[in-house]
Image (cartoon, rainbow, N blue to C red):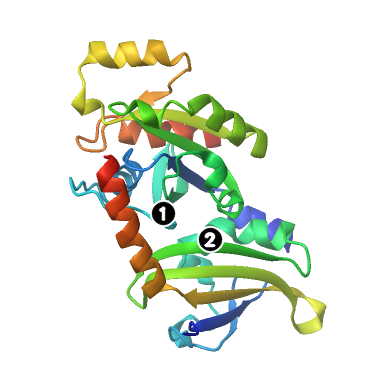
Amino acid sequence: MRLQILINFMLSRKVILTGSFGVGKTSLFSRFINNTFSDRYITTIGVKVDKKSLEIDGQEISILLWDIAGEVTQNKVPNSYFLGASAIIYVFDLTRPSTYKNIKLDIDYLNKMLPNITILIVGNKKDLLDQEKIKTIGEDLGYPIDLYTSAKTGENVENLFETIGRGFIE
Amino acid sequence: MSKVRQTITLDQRGYLLTSCDSLFPTEKFLNKDLKEFFPFLESVFVDLIQTLETGRIIQFPKVETKHIFLPGFYDYSFRLIRIRNEEIGLQWDVVDATNEYTDLQTEQQSAHEKEL
């Protein structure tokens, strides 16, 4: 019976959006799930879950996306939220240094709690800065950034989830 | 004021067995795979069945849902149970905390807007 369950769910993967508040996690969630965007900020207080299917190299993958309330540090997120996660997208706001000042501590914490899990670090709101400024932030951060996105324009959002999905089938 | 709680039991495939229907009717889900209707459940079900220790309760607070039949904020909790023929199943408790968390959301919204 357990084997049958595993087979049925082989192509569904839980992915978590996390990071500080106001960085655009819910906007990335809405852009990916519904291809919508709103300028109005509405705080998330717990978790929202939805899903969307992607086709990558002929393989269909169901992304079960968890949009978690922003916390200043990751150790404030309930541990249960991470159960069964296959990947984490750690989002920060390129325009607010306070959202990436704890990046090393947060990633260390997530790596320790969820060893062997894929963590992607994403700088969001790239539409608000020029390329030179984004490059400087990346260099100053001293931490590898996987992608720069804009939930507002949609830039790199599809790419982000395709990158994650590709990791699941490789 | 006590909160309304709905207790649901599922077999190890995720099929609905029983429900007290305190919050939403489940007649249309009877003998169906609930994971197909609840992405939340789909994303944790296998891990709950495979890793949850008997007697242990795992809680997921502040789950926001947009289901037509269940809009609002809820606290979820799960525990393994024994069902027919000693088979393992899952008990899922859904507690309506919409009023409490709507107030919390208003407070948090205000605090965050000051910082943004």
- Amino acid under disc 1: Lys
- Disc 2 packing (10 Å; few <14; some 14–19; many ≥20): many
Who's the residue at 46% across and 36% down the image? A89
Left or right of B95, for residue A48: left
| Image position, residue A91 (x, y; %) | 40, 34
Residue at figure coordinates x 36%, y 54% from the top left: A44
Confirm or deny contact between disc 1 and disc 2 (CB under 8 A). yes
Q: Quadrant of the C terminus of chain A?
A: top right
Could you say which disc has been placed on residue B12 in the image? Answer: none
- Taking depth in this image into account, of A154 and B102 the one nearest to the observer is B102
Q: Which mark is residue B42?
A: 2
Task: Determine if residue B13 is in view.
Answer: no
Say which quadrant the N terminus of chain A sits in.
bottom right
Judge from the rendering whether residue A39 lies leftward or rightward of residue A101; answer left or right: left
Rounded to the nearest angstrom, the CA distance separating label 1 from label 2 is 10 Å
**From what the image shows, is residue A130 above or below residue B63?**
above
Q: Is residue B15 visible?
A: yes
Give the residue at mark 1: A51
Please name the residue shown 26% across and 31% down the image.
A125
- Closest to the observer, A10 or A153: A153
The one nearer the camera, A92 or A2, is A92
Q: Report the chain holding disc 2.
A: B
Label 1 SS: strand
- Residue B60 in the image: x percent, y percent? 55, 62
The answer to whether B111 is drawn above or below residue B58 in the figure is: above
> Could you tell me which chain the residue with mark 1 belongs to?
A
**Residue at image coords 23%, 14%:** A131
- The amino acid beneath tag 2 is Glu
